[in-house]
């Protein structure tokens, strides 16, 4: 771990973060894979001007994201915790997004429904939106370290909580182990869209996600 640095990225890192998310994270994260978003993105290629890229750049500009880099190769991203201020997304306009992305957004909204964490914890919080570690570096504690550092960052900003949606067995385990409380949980296969078609057509019975919160 001594050879790796965790820091808040600046604009010079944005392209490397975009490449990491596109080439690694999006191809492995289960909501993206099972909704069909990963395949669509792979077909289209990385476009830094579309809605999704714009959202990621806005998130990075909040200055709450953390990246891990290898000191010997600082231009390469080892892992990311894309963090944003937790906000109420009830008014979010989603019709401009592809169906696969809409499925993910509606699913997350459904998981958060009925949980006003800002009110419950009496203050602002940090939302760990995307936690990813390059596949070749997995299983070495990088995600745990990024989560610990995100908690510290939230505390430095006097935030009252950190929340996330855990969609992998590793993050379900990690967050539980680090004292996050499960607010809701749902299997991907149970999530049906307004047209009665599944939101995650390629989901397996093992795919589930948890809305999880840690008070600070
Ligand atoms: C999920 C991900 C971030 C984990 O990164 P990582 O650096 O390998 O994670 P860590 O090594 O820090 O920790 C993994 C933990 O999960 C545990 N784990 C591994 N496989 C597991 C499994 N199948 N079930 C439960 N726990 C598991 C490990 O034992 C470890 O816990 P420990 O620290 O208590 O021993 C990484 O696999 C990834 O980027 N996946 C693709 C993107 C994604 O799905 N992100 C999560 C979205 S919420």
Image (spheres, rainbow, N blue to C red):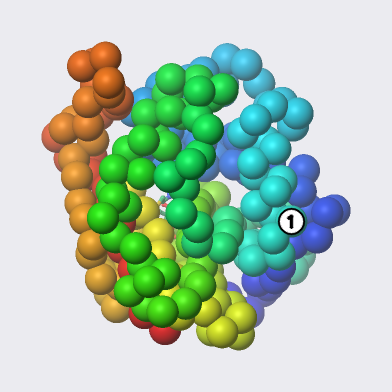
Residue 198 seen in the current view: yes
Furthest residue in direction right, as rendered: 12
Q: Position of residue 3 (x, y in %)?
A: 67, 74
- Horizontally, residue 85 falls left or right of residue 119, namely right
Is disc 1 placed on a helix, strand or loop? helix
Seen at 19% across and 45% down, the residue is 186
Seen at 78% across and 53% down, the residue is 13
Q: Quadrant of residue 4?
A: bottom right
Q: Position of residue 170 (x, y in %)?
A: 32, 57
In the image, residue 26 above or below residue 76: above
Foreground of the two, 92 or 172: 92
Q: Quadrant of residue 157?
A: bottom right
The residue where tag 1 is placed is: 61
Other residues around mark 1 within 10 Å, as few (<14) / some (14–19) / many (≥20): some
Q: Quadrant of residue 174?
A: bottom left
Residue 136 seen in the current view: no
Count of numbered labels shown in the rendering: 1
In the image, residue 52 above or below residue 193: below
Q: Position of residue 45 (x, y in %)?
A: 66, 21
> Quick check: is the Cβ at mark 1 less than 8 Å away from ligand 1?
no
Seen at 50% across and 39% down, the residue is 92
Q: Position of residue 12 (x, y in %)?
A: 85, 53
- Horizontally, residue 103 falls left or right of residue 176, namely right
* Quadrant of image for the C terminus: bottom left
In the image, residue 116 above or below residue 208: below
* Quadrant of image for the N terminus: bottom right
Seen at 37% across and 78% down, the residue is 121
- Horizontally, residue 15 falls left or right of residue 161, namely right
In the image, residue 131 above or below residue 179: above
Ligand 1 image-quadrant field: bottom left
Foreground of the two, 18 or 164: 164
């Amino acid at each position: 771990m001594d050879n790796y640095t965790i820091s808040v990225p600046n604009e010079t890192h944005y392209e490397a973060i975009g490449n990491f998310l596109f080439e690694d994270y999006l191809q492995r994260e289960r909501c993206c894979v099972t909704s069909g978003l990963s395949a669509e993105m792979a077909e289209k290629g990385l476009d830094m001007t579309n809605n999704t890229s714009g959202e990621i750049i806005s998130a990075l500009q909040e200055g709450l994201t953390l990246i891990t880099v290898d000191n010997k190769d600082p231009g390469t991203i080892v892992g990311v915790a894309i963090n944003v201020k937790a906000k109420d997304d009830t008014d979010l306009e989603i019709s401009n997004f592809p169906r696969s992305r809409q499925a993910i957004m509606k699913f997350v909204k459904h998981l958060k429904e009925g949980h006003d964490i800002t009110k419950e914890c009496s203050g602002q919080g940090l939302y760990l939106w995307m936690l990813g570690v390059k596949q070749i570096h997995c299983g070495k504690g990088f995600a745990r370290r990024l989560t610990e550092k995100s908690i510290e960052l939230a505390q430095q900003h006097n935030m009252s909580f950190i929340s996330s949606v855990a969609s992998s067995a590793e993050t379900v385990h990690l967050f539980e182990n680090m004292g996050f409380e499960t607010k809701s949980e749902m299997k991907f296969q149970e999530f049906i869209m307004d047209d009665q078609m599944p939101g995650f057509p390629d989901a397996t019975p093992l795919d589930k996600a948890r809305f999880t919160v840690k008070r600070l």
